[in-house]
Every structure is written in structure tokens, then in C-alpha cells.
Image (spheres, helix red, strand yellow):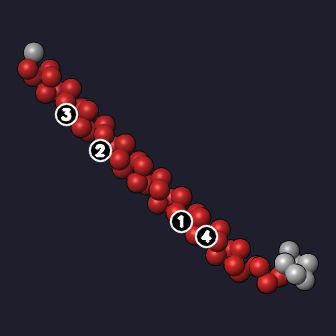
Amino acid sequence: MKARKEEKSSLCGVLMVLVAIAVGVAGIVYALSTHRRHVNQEKWKDYDECGLV
């Protein structure tokens, strides 16, 4: 009975670590995509007035 409880506890811990890693990776991907979009808008904002874009 005690071994089964420890097994569930360790499985829960591993799942929580995997979820934390997934959230971290998703946050990094979101930050990079937002930064890239901002850089692209800054690059082309001067051309908005002349109608090229």
C-alpha cells in the first residue's frame, strides 16, 4: 500500500515537471514570435506612407 502511494506521488511530480517545462517552452516561443513581429513592423513602418506595402 505504501509503495503504491509513493509511486503515485513520484508520477505526479514528474507530470508537474513536464507541465512546467511545456509552459516554459511555450512562453519562450510566444516571446520570440512577438519580438519578431515587432521588429518586422518597425522595419516596414516607414514605407506605410508611400504605399509600397
**C-alpha gap between disc 1 and disc 3:** 33 Å
Q: Give the amino acid type for the residue marked by disc 1 in the picture.
A: Leu
Q: Give the amino acid type for the residue marked by disc 2 in the picture.
A: Val
Which residue is at 71% across, 74% downward?
A: 41
**C-alpha gap between disc 4 and disc 1:** 6 Å
Q: Give the amino acid type for the residue marked by disc 3 in the picture.
A: Ser
- Disc 2 element: helix
**C-alpha gap between disc 1 and disc 2:** 23 Å
- Asked if the residues shown at circle 2 and circle 3 are in contact, with their CB atoms under 8 angstroms apart, the answer is no
Q: Which residue is mark 4?
A: 36
31 relative to 40 in the view: left or right:
left
Q: Which residue is mark 3?
A: 10
Q: Which residue is mark 1?
A: 32
If you read the primary sequence from the N terminus, does the residue marked by circle 2 or circle 4 appear first? Answer: 2
Q: Which mark is residue 44?
A: none
- Asked if the residues shown at circle 1 and circle 2 are in contact, with their CB atoms under 8 angstroms apart, the answer is no
Which residue is at 34% across, 43% downward?
A: 18
At label 4, counting other C-alpha atoms closer than 10 Å, the crowd grade (few under 14, some 14-19, many 20 or more) is: few
Q: Give the amino acid type for the residue marked by disc 4 in the picture.
A: Arg
- Asked if the residues shown at circle 4 and circle 1 are in contact, with their CB atoms under 8 angstroms apart, the answer is yes
- Residue 44, given in percent of the width and then of the height, sits at 76, 79
**C-alpha gap between disc 2 and disc 4:** 29 Å
50 relative to 37 in the view: left or right:
right
- Disc 3 element: helix
Which residue is at 54% across, 58% downward?
A: 30
Q: Which residue is mark 2?
A: 17
